[in-house]
Image (cartoon, rainbow, N blue to C red):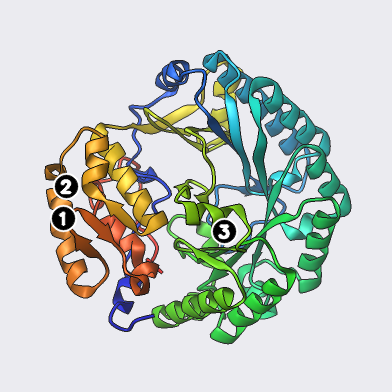
Amino acid sequence: MSDRLAPYGTRNVPRYTSYPTAPHFNEGVDGPLYARWLEELPAATRLSLYLHVPFCRDICHYCGCHTKASRRDAPLERYAETLAREIELVGEHLGTRHPVSHIHWGGGTPSLLPAAKLEDLASRLGRVFELMPGIEHAMELDPRHVGAGLARTLAAIGITRVSLGVQDMDDTVQKAIGRVQSLEVVTAATRHLRDAGLTSINFDLMYGLPHQSRDTILETVARTVELRPARIALFGYAHVPWMKKHQRLIDEAALPAPAERLAMAGLAREALIAAGYVAIGLDHFALPEDSMAIALADGSLKRNFQGYTTDTGEALVGFGVSSIGRLPQGHVQNAADTGAWERAIQSGRLPIVRGFAMSAEDNARADIIEQLMTDYRVDLDAVMRRHGLTLACLSASLDKLAPLMADGVVARAGSVVSVPEDARPYVRVAAAAFDAYLGQAAASAIAPRHSMAV
């Protein structure tokens, strides 16, 4: 990575899996408004579904997800029953079986749900929605809890893609982050999944972890490449102990310095590309034949709350505690408290507690940011005209681009803004120039403190 651009890597900016970002959601969007938004959706609107299961057997020290530990199945069974009722409740407001092109189960570790509950929920989705041919049905997994039986269950309920949370394969790093899983465990999980016919496998890796070094991350990449997952996500560890108290278990003195973190990200990226993976956006890699690499090539790549995606849904409907949805009218988010979520659903109410109603300008800025994050190029005039607006709305953002242009973070030719290849790791900084809310007081009680750009 260029020394000239390196200082931009330490800037704190959002990840832009949504715009506006979640801290700016407000309580003006609630259950009754969400119900109306659902009822207003045309019957042909193609949906994407997200199911959040906030349970793990143990909480890893690095985790930034909304989840909790449970060693017993009873809480998971109760949760699954409420989740089933929420699916039915949303279906009642939709009024018709909308087509669904993508389903994603996240968490937590959703595969911890008992097999009978997984089967019931999958069957219920098929009754409430019209699952389209060729649907991508994905689930996040902990390789420590993947056996042959689970792999067969996942295949039986229609899962077509799985993501394994590998993070790092060095023993010292694993102990420091509270997630010890040997290469043998990861290899066995991969084999069980492939034996069951689940060949679309993703690995999630991380850089910036305690005790990580250039050598250890390159060793992790080498072991990963040997197992040949179809996709690899290489995330930068976000150390936010003010938000995630368990991260205080991580020794901050063992975290790599910003310059070393940048170097590790660059080395891992180069190694993955050398191994034949296509670099996609900020932090994803895919084999050339994978659908994500194809989406990058044909311009259909998207970005949502799950990160980079091939999802073609026109609206995202979320289920479960804290889940976020995105409809044409705006963003919605469920209650983050399990009790409040359950009580709302049991009383027949949609459990939405906050969200954001989008204006035409909000939608235009969201499109600009998404195009920069996925294609590194956007025609501002074309986007604004599509939303019935003019470039005058972006005058403040264009002013913010000036220093970025001087440093080579962005280039501009007329109304086309692009990110040069050597500056692409810093694309979040370019996207932030178009964020009208960045720096404003957040609607949430806790002011947002974002992670480093790289």
Crowding around mark 1 (Cα neighbors within 10 Å: few <14, some 14 to 19, many 20+) is: some
Q: Secondary structure at mark 2?
A: helix
The answer to whether any part of residue 43 appears in the image is yes
Q: Earlier in the sequence, mark 3 or mark 1?
A: 3
**Residue type pointed to by label 3:** Cys
3 vs 1, front mark: 1
x, y percent for residue 249:
56, 67
Tell me if 5 is positioned left or right of 227 in this view: left
**Residue type pointed to by label 2:** Leu
Residue 106 vs 426, above or below: the answer is above
Q: Earlier in the sequence, mark 2 or mark 3?
A: 3
Q: Which mark is residue 63?
A: 3
Q: Check if mark 2's residue and mark 1's residue have beta carbons within 8 Å.
A: yes
| Quadrant of res 224 | bottom right
Q: Quadrant of the C terminus?
A: bottom left
Q: Pointer 2: what residue?
A: 394
Q: Pointer 1: what residue?
A: 398
x, y percent for residue 269:
51, 74
Residue at 55% of width from left, 60% of height from top?
246
